[in-house]
Image (tube, rainbow, N blue to C red):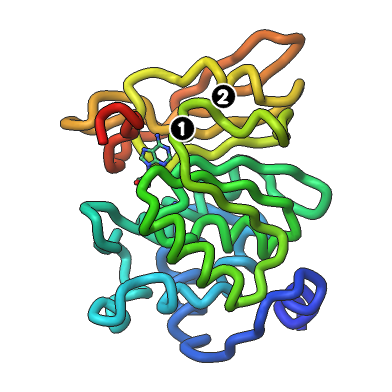
């Protein structure tokens, strides 16, 4: 019932397809590892992850692992998506910036909570396919653009939360500027060739407070001039 209401409220197309696999994913991979926020769990139960992976990978969509999505990029492991979602507290009335749209799955999870999502992807083909899929599925609260996310999205700033889904060697200063007072940012920081640290950045009285959350492995944060 909660899912149905969520879907109707936020305009997305309901999908009962593979519901049992999603339920098992939430129970065994997400709840079992300590993610308990009901809003996050409802979104993970609702969004049809299998539609965000290439057709040849569809049978593995609910497994406990990241999967390739083309162009050398990956859709994150379900637990990581849930963990990062819980940290930034999405929900109705929250404005969230995502850097690294990729498949569009993380953006869909955020939008399913009722948040207004702005998502930037540097690879135009991925940006286009994610935009089409999100529209097809009825996620009206997501706006996407193809650009270098280093610069953020100034026109829509400040953001209540920023989620970066590619590993950066340092936190791009424009993203810190575009984070609202009391805002939350989650970002993997470190060398693209090693394990990185997932960091939580909080803005208080204009200053940032950083907390290390856990070791992670993400694809590299690219720059437009490297393309
Ligand atoms: N959130 C995605 C995960 C995609 S992997 C999902 O749910 O599927 C990370 C993505 O970040 C890749 O698609 C990569 O192309 C993109 N990326 C890397 N550097 C970027 C940058 N500077 N700006 C925007 N996107 C970037």
Element at label 1 = strand
Figure check: 186 above or below 30 = above
Figure check: 204 above or below 25 = above
Across and down, in percent, residue 3 comes to 71, 78
Q: Earlier in the sequence, mark 2 or mark 1?
A: 2
- The quadrant of the rendering that contains the C terminus is top left
Q: Which residue is mark 2?
A: 175
**Circles 2 and 1 in contact, beta carbons < 8 Å:** yes
What numbered label is drawn on residue 187? 1
Q: Residue shown at 52%/34% (left/top)?
A: 186
Front-most of residues 223 and 216: 223
Across and down, in percent, residue 221 comes to 34, 34
- The quadrant of the rendering that contains the N terminus is bottom right
Between the residue at mark 2 and the residue at mark 1, the CA separation in whole angstroms equals: 11 Å
Category of crowding for the residue at label 1, using alpha-carbon neighbours closer than 10 angstroms: few (below 14), some (14–19), many (at least 20) = many
Across and down, in percent, residue 212 comes to 44, 25
Figure check: 58 above or below 222 = below
């Amino acid at each position: 019932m909660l899912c149905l209401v969520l879907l109707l409220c936020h305009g997305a197309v309901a999908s009962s397809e593979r519901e049992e696999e999603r339920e098992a994913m939430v129970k065994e991979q997400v709840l079992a590892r300590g993610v308990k926020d009901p809003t996050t769990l409802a979104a993970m139960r609702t969004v049809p992850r299998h539609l965000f992976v290439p057709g040849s990978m569809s049978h593995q969509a609910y497994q406990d692992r990241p999967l390739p999505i083309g162009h050398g990029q990956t859709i994150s492991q379900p637990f990581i998506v849930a963990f990062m979602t819980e940290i930034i507290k999405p929900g109705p009335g929250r404005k969230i910036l995502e850097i690294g749209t990729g498949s569009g799955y993380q953006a869909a999870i955020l939008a399913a909570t009722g948040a207004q999502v702005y998502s930037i992807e540097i690879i135009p083909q991925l940006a286009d396919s994610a935009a089409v899929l999100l529209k097809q599925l009825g996620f009206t609260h997501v706006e996407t653009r193809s650009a270098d996310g280093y610069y953020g999205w100034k026109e829509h700033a400040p953001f209540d939360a920023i989620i970066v889904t590619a590993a950066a060697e340092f936190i791009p200063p424009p993203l810190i500027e575009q984070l609202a007072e009391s805002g939350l940012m989650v970002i993997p920081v470190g060398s693209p060739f090693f394990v990185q640290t997932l960091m939580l950045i909080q803005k208080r009285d204009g200053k940032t407070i950083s907390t290390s959350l856990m070791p992670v492995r993400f694809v590299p944060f690219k720059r437009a001039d490297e393309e």
